Amino acid sequence: MRVSSIIDISLVDVPGIPVTVLFTAGCNLDCPYCQNAEIIPLDSGEEITIDLLVEQLRGNLTDGYCITGGEPTIQKDLPELLRELRLEKSKHINLNTQGTVPDILKKSIPFLDSVWFDMKTIPECYREVTRVKNNPWPRVERSIKLILDSEVSFWPRTTYVGGLTKPSDILKISEILKDFGFEGSYVIQNYIKSSGTREEDVKGFAEPLLDEAKSILGKIPEGIKIQFEWR
Ligand code: SF4
């Protein structure tokens, strides 16, 4: 597996649970606002065996794991890692994904407790926003269904980017989630320009206004609770 870094303990990645965070390296999308742009290249990070990785992750006194990236599901041995981590039955295992590799996600689901699911945009704009040749939406759709049909907690989340995201996008995504049969919290977090973004790619973007994002609140379908996380 290609690994970028490990954070021994985080109190913010999984609500209420101190976790060890693993950043896998490499991503199959190219979102212009990516906060971890240096680990998008598929040859970034370093190759580590599952045995060695498990050894490094297990030493921490946390109550679980958050596997993020990059995009963890492009790592073919992700299910193997999760199977090993699952042996510690009491620990929570959370995966962050944008859902474009449903085959690996499907093999990972038996070992997971929760998934932060990155809803990039509305289906019509997926290819354009993620800057890839083939429209990822059909695979994303399949991944959402796989999680909702399982026992794993589905936690949808969108990064609201000023100059890219529109309030109507949040409304449309909420309606799509409702149509999938989802009920619960949908987190909207604000885009922040950081040292991890690429200067030339974020020129047209701005840190968004909370009032703009909130303008659709009255129209959100029943059962979907928008939770703003403005940092
Ligand atoms: S999916 Fe995530 S890691 Fe990949 S390019 Fe987009 S924001 Fe970056």
Image (cartoon, rainbow, N blue to C red):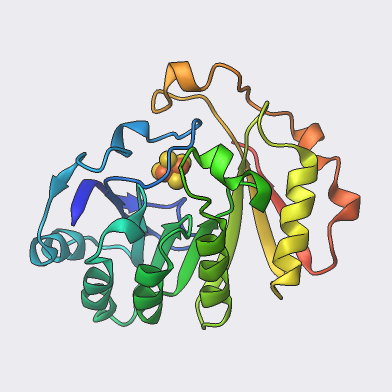
- Foreground of the two, 139 or 36: 139
Asked whether, in this view, residue 4 is left or right of residue 48, the answer is right
Total residue callouts: 0
Residue 72 lies, in percent from the top left, at 33, 57
In the rendered image of this protein, does residue 211 appear above or below residue 109? above
Q: Is residue 225 visible?
A: no
Which residue, as the protein is rendered here, is positioned at the far right? 218
- Name the residue: 58% across, 65% down: 141
Which residue, as the protein is rendered here, is positioned at the far front? 133
Q: Quadrant of the N terminus?
A: bottom left
Residue 198 lies, in percent from the top left, at 42, 22
- Foreground of the two, 42 or 90: 42
Q: Quadrant of the C terminus?
A: top right
Asked whether, in this view, residue 198 is left or right of residue 166, the answer is left
- Name the residue: 22% across, 73% down: 80
Residue 213 lies, in percent from the top left, at 77, 38
- The picture quadrant where one finds residue 175 is bottom right
Residue 101 lies, in percent from the top left, at 40, 62
Q: Is residue 94 visible?
A: yes
Q: Quadrant of ligand 1?
A: top left
In the rendered image of this protein, does residue 167 appear above or below residue 50? above
In the rendered image of this protein, does residue 41 appear above or below residue 61? above
Asked whether, in this view, residue 186 is left or right of residue 62, the answer is right
- Name the residue: 37% across, 32% down: 37
- Foreground of the two, 150 or 214: 150
- Name the residue: 9% across, 67% down: 51
